Image: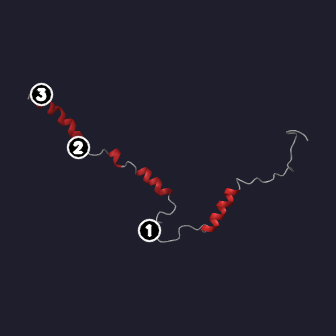
Amino acid sequence: MRSIVRLTAAALPMLLTACGTTPHLDRGFGNSVRLLQAQQTIYPDAGRQRRPAANGMDGPAATAAYDAYQRSFTTKEESNNDSLSIGLGNKR
């Protein structure tokens, strides 16, 4: 019985430390990240107002531009050999 009382008396202060408040250092935890995100947002009120999404291309024009971009990697253009070479490479 005495060992249970001693064990309880020893464990009780350790268990009560879990009931402590958050230190002052942790109260502002994450505020710097939230501040940086807010500073990097172009238009913070975008979700509150009904406006056009962006001043950019319409859908068909964007699709055509993207398709042309993708095709530029598959087709080879003829290179023009009129470049100036100063003693580099093989002479023909």
Q: Secondary structure at mark 3?
A: helix
Q: Residue at 86% across / 44% down in the picture?
A: 85
Question: Pointer 1: what residue?
Answer: 48
**Which quarter of the image is occupied by the C terminus?**
top right
Q: CA distance from mark 2 to mark 3?
A: 25 Å
Q: CA distance from mark 3 to mark 1?
A: 64 Å
Going by the numbered disc 2, the residue's amino acid type is: Cys
Quarter-of-image position of residue 18: top left
Q: Residue at 63% across / 64% down in the picture?
A: 63
Question: Pointer 3: what residue?
Answer: 3
Going by the numbered disc 3, the residue's amino acid type is: Ser
Q: Residue 46: x and y, percent?
A: 48, 66
Neighbour tally class for label 3: few under 14, some 14-19, many 20 plus, Cα within 10 Å: few
Instruction: From the image, state whether disc 3 or disc 1 is nearer to you.
Output: 3
Instruction: From the image, state whether disc 2 or disc 3 is nearer to you.
Output: 3
* Residue 70 against residue 59 in the figure, above or below: above
The residue most toward the front is 74
Q: Residue at 84% across / 52% down in the picture?
A: 80
Q: Is residue 60 left or right of residue 26?
A: right
Q: Is residue 29 left or right of residue 73?
A: left
N-terminal label among 2 and 1: 2
Neighbour tally class for label 2: few under 14, some 14-19, many 20 plus, Cα within 10 Å: few
Q: Which mark is residue 19?
A: 2
Q: Are marks 2 and 1 in contact (CB under 8 Å)?
A: no
